[in-house]
Every structure is written in structure tokens, then in C-alpha cells.
Image: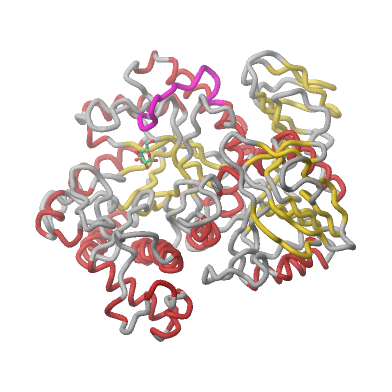
Amino acid sequence: MPSLRDAARGRILFGGDYNPEQWPEEVWEDDVRLMKDAGVNSVTLGVFSWAKIEPRPGAREFGWLDRLMDLMHTHGIGVVLATPTASPPPWMGAEHPETLPRGEDGSVVWYGSRQQFCASSPVYRRHAAALTEDLAARYADHPALTVWHINNEYCTHCWCDGTAAHFRRWLRDRYATVEALNEAWGTAFWSQRYDTWEQILPPRKAQYMKNPTQVLDFKRFTSDALMECYLAERDIVARHTPQIPVTTNFMPLWSGQDAWAWSAQEDIVSVDVYPDPKAPQAAQYNAMLADMTRSQAAGPWMLMEQAAGPVNWRGVNHPKPAGLNRLWSLQSVARGADAVCYFQWRQSRQGAEKFHSGMVTHAGENGRTFREVKQLGAELATIGEAVSGADVPSEVAILHDWDSWWAGAQEGRPSRLLDYTEIVQSWHRALWESGISTEFARPEADLSRFRMVAVPQLYLLTDAAIDNLVAYVRGGGTLVCGFFSGIADADDRIRPGGMDVRMRDLCGIRTLHEWWPLDADTTVECDGFRASVWSEELEADPGAEVVSAYRGGELDGLPAVVRNDRAYYVSTLPEPDALRSLLGRVAAEAGAVPVLAGLPEGVEAVRRGDLLFLLHHGRGSVTVPVPGAQVDLLTGAAVNGSVDLGRYGVAVLRGATL
Ligand code: GLA
């Protein structure tokens, strides 16, 4: 199977979305000059070019794209060629209104923006396939082609009649009979029983809370329906060019696509990452998304989009201070990225994204952003050969699952303040701040190679997942399980006892009496720490150890953290320092150690292959002690005993005694 390695060929791909159709052709030569200047070796063409290629139904205007493909090839720049199917032209919606998505209340999502397609529409699919076929045939042998990029950030949802029919077909495959569906959905509740398939609808606007399993199945279905669109286009391009890797770019930690399932269908896993430069945890967030994407890719991955400066879709859009773009880019490389690309090459002058930065901003080649882009391009060229393709070893896994997220994030739960992604981020942060390298894994994955497995919060666990966790601990692994986990089965049916008995036995919990979720901005005292979001009224097994108990309030004296041999249960969300020391201590017991001990505040160490990346997230200067004699690949300087890092400084050391 083709892979990122085939496209990168020992380099780090560097470049971005290139939308030359927004510019007169005179600008293209200037683009190429600046690309060469910046060390750009890859551009993504065609992402939103449908109306340019097919201005009216059946037309094909490829001349401009031919010229661009040739231009890129002449200058040694590879092309990630997109199927432009994310943004159907207005003629599609005007002539075929059934291709336009409808909201839960039946309202139409009109053209005039982008991504206005219903994934279940046969007309949309037919047009998308025909265009993909012609695009693939035309450029199959073009020497500039390096990667196929299918669509863009698949994210549409639709509740129309066509979707309803498609949803019913999906449900028939899953349940075979209406009776089995009634059973799974628990339709005895509130008189929701269905008598025929035809009565079943997507979960449309309703009077009160919807059937949770219907909502869960609709989320599963929507991810699958979008994936059918992806697979149809992927199969077309793969038939023309079996040697060219295929990807579609994810929004990271996005609930609309089960990225575990999707990644398995990609040759390259790629992702679009936009941390807010002002967010206090932005560096860790960037690290977490890198770890997640690397885990989905099971190896090197492609940073398909990031912003060189500000985005334009937050309430307040902050630029990146000098040096931050370089730091976060190298952090992504440290954590497995073999491609560092941007949205977009040249900042637009018109359209909805004219205030979104580009690699070349409105300030042009003399702007700070472009100067920094150039520096980064040169540095990536310097370290490319040493780093590309190398692994990032991790001995700790964090479990993460879309089914559980979908089921747990619905109405009618014990607390609306329980935010799955925030809990995942808190646990990753604790390990990141401990300097411990982590991966993400799905709950049913083979976990045997990890010394420790962390479950931040998995409300829904299948029987297979629970058996997997039990077997993992029996086999010598160490498990730390967070609250409100193992509660529901695959149909979102509450497990007997309120938490699965195998999970309770594993974690040393005899009875889970009640959940005691906490109000916003309130905390609960426990031995040794304060905690927020959640607490539980638990009774531990007599043989289990109560590591920490609640103090004060209704739960005074009851267990907060329980240990049963190598399985820990954490029934609340300890404040960050406490969670860090808890997970750091358990990881150490399990034999998982930080990448480098004794790091100054704000310095992150990541091992990739035989390289040691040191990344300084602070603005002052620090001296980092490092073992042995080494060379900093970025500067060529010899390093002996310690390395000095200034504001947002980075060193990439080779020869380290690791
Ligand atoms: C996404 C899209 C891009 C662009 C950026 C802006 O990642 O894929 O087309 O809109 O957002 O941040």
C-alpha cells in the first residue's frame, strides 16, 4: 500500500492549500518564486475548485489546472490533488434541490457558503463520482501528483427524506428486524414503538428529549454515510493510480467522524490543527492532537492544515507571536508529523476568509509571517532526512472512543457540565506535564504493549472492550479508570448495578450508590487534593485500598480514589496538579518514565527515532541539562551537558544517551 513515505521521500512535506483560481495568472509566477524561496515542496490544489472545473453541468475546464500542475512540476513542487467535492457549485443546488442538506427542523441549508451537500443524495454522489473519475483519469500520469486529498473535512449532517431512507437501510443492516430495533432503542419508553421500517426517521426536531439510542445510531450512521462518499471517491482514484496514497483531512477531536474507523481506510492520516494562541493549554492541546493523529495513523502523519497567523472564525482571532508558528510546527514534527502544511499559501483578498492568515499574508514577502515561514522551511529541510519516517515510542495509552463520546454527550444525563473532550484533555495534560509520552488507543485495541492504560471517561464500553481491559490487567498491565465509565452497553442501556460488574470487580468497587455531579465553579475536598466536575458515592470492596477519600459534605469519608492491585479508579476530576502527580506516580510504578528527567518549567522533551526534541514553550531563557555529547541538528552546534533555549526555542539533538 502506498504511504506518506512515498510522498515525502525522506523529506518533511512543507507547503499548504494553494487556491490560485482566486488570483490572476500573473500572480502564479510570483507564487512559485516565493514558494522556492520558502522551501515549499508540496501544495494542495483544487480543494474548492468544483465550480471552476465544472462551471455548468457536465462541462470540464481543466486547462488552468493543467497549467498549474505543469508549473508545479517544473519547479519541483509536488501536488496533493483534491477532489473538489466539498463545495458543490450553485447549479447543483439550483437544479437538484434534493442535494441540499436539511436541518433537524426541515430547514434547507442553502448554497452560498460551502459543504452544502447531503451525503445520502444519489445525485450529489453521481456528480461527485463523475468529476472524480475525470480528474483522476486526467492527472493519473502527471509527474507532479503525490497524494490524493478526497473532499475536505467531511462534516455535513442532514435530516432530509433521502437521508431518512438511507438511515433505514443502515438500520436494517444493523438490526434485521423492527423488533430488534425496538429492543435496542428501548422504545417501550414513552410509547415510541415502531411497527414498520417506514415509520422510522432520523432524530428530527421534537417536543422533548429524543430517544438516546436513535440519536446514537444516527451519529454512527452519519459517520458511515459520509465515509461511503469518501470510499467511493477513494476507490475511483485508487483504480487510476494504485501507487499514489490517498487521504482525507480530519478535524481533530471532531465528533462527526469516527476517526478510528476512517483512518483504517486511508493511506495517509491527515488533520487540520488550529490551537488558539491565547489559550492557556494551547501547547498541550497541539501535543494531544498530534498524539491522537499519530495513533490513528499508527505512525507518521500529515499536518494538512494549520494557520501561520490568526484564523478568522473565533470570537477574537489572535495572531501567533513571533516564533510560535515555528515552535508548534516542530512540536508536531517531534510527535510524528512528516508533513507541515497550512491553510493557506496566499491570504485571500476576497471571500469569507480574507482575514484568515496565509503563509504569505497581505503584508507580502516582507511581512514577519512570511519571514518566519521561510526560516521554518529551511529548518525542516535540514532535519527532514534524519526525522522523517521515525517512530515516537510510547508506553502509556489513553483510551478514546467515538461511540462512548456520542452516547455520553446527550441530553438527560446526570450533568451537562461533563464535557468528554475536556476530560480527555485533562488526563492527557497530566501525562504531558509529567513528561510521559502517550498514545491514544480504542478500547478494543490490543493493549498488551503498554505499561499503563488510562481511561479518562468512557461512559459506553462494549462487552469486548470490558473483557479487553480485564485481560489487560490480568496480563500484568496497569489501568487507571476515570469516573462515569463502563456505565452503558453498546445500545446505551445502563449496565446492571449502574456500572458494569466486571469493571467494578476490576477496580475494587462493591457498590456505586449515586453520582454526585458538581455545580460549575465548585470543588470537593479529597485527601491530598481538591477536585471538580463530578463525585461519586461509592463503597469499595473490602480487599481494595482507598487511596484518597472525600472530606466534608455528603460524601465525607467515602472513597474518592480506589486501588485494586494494578487497577485504579478515580471517581472525580482531581485538580491539574493532583491528577498529574497521581498519573505520574502510577505510571512510575508501572515502569513508564518521563522522556527526560529534570526539565526546567515549560520545556517539553520528545523522543522520535534517535532524535531528542527539546521544545521551550516559555518566553524567557532556560538551560536544559542533557546527557552525553550531542549535536543540535538545527544549528549544527555541538552540545555538551546542557543546551540553552531562548523564547520558544527548539533543539533537535542527535547522539543523545536516551
Ligand atoms: C478548515 C478548512 C479550510 C479553511 C480553514 C480555516 O480547516 O479545511 O478550508 O476554511 O478551516 O481555518
Q: Residue 330: where, in percent of width, then height?
A: 59, 32
Question: Ligand 1 lies in which image quarter?
Answer: top left
Q: Residue 69: where, in percent of width, then height?
A: 31, 43
Q: Residue 363: where, in percent of width, then height?
A: 34, 16
Residue that appears at 56% across and 49% down: 420
Q: Is residue 160 above or below residue 60?
A: below
The question of residue 324 being in magenta is answered with yes
Let me know if residue 388 appears in the view. no
Residue that appears at 76% across and 40% down: 552
Give the quarter of the figure containing the C terminus: top right
Horizontally, residue 312 falls left or right of residue 174, namely: left
**Quadrant position of residue 174:** bottom left
Q: Residue 100: where, in percent of width, then height?
A: 20, 56
Could you tell me what secondary structure mostly forms the magenta stretch?
Answer: loop
Q: Is residue 424 above or below residue 261?
A: above
Q: Is residue 589 above or below residue 128?
A: above
The residue closer to the viewer here, 57 or 12, is 57
The question of residue 645 being in magenta is answered with no
User: What is the span of residues highlighted in magenta in the rendered image?
Assistant: 312-326
The residue closer to the viewer here, 311 or 503, is 503
The residue closer to the viewer here, 200 or 312, is 200
Residue that appears at 42% across and 55% down: 256
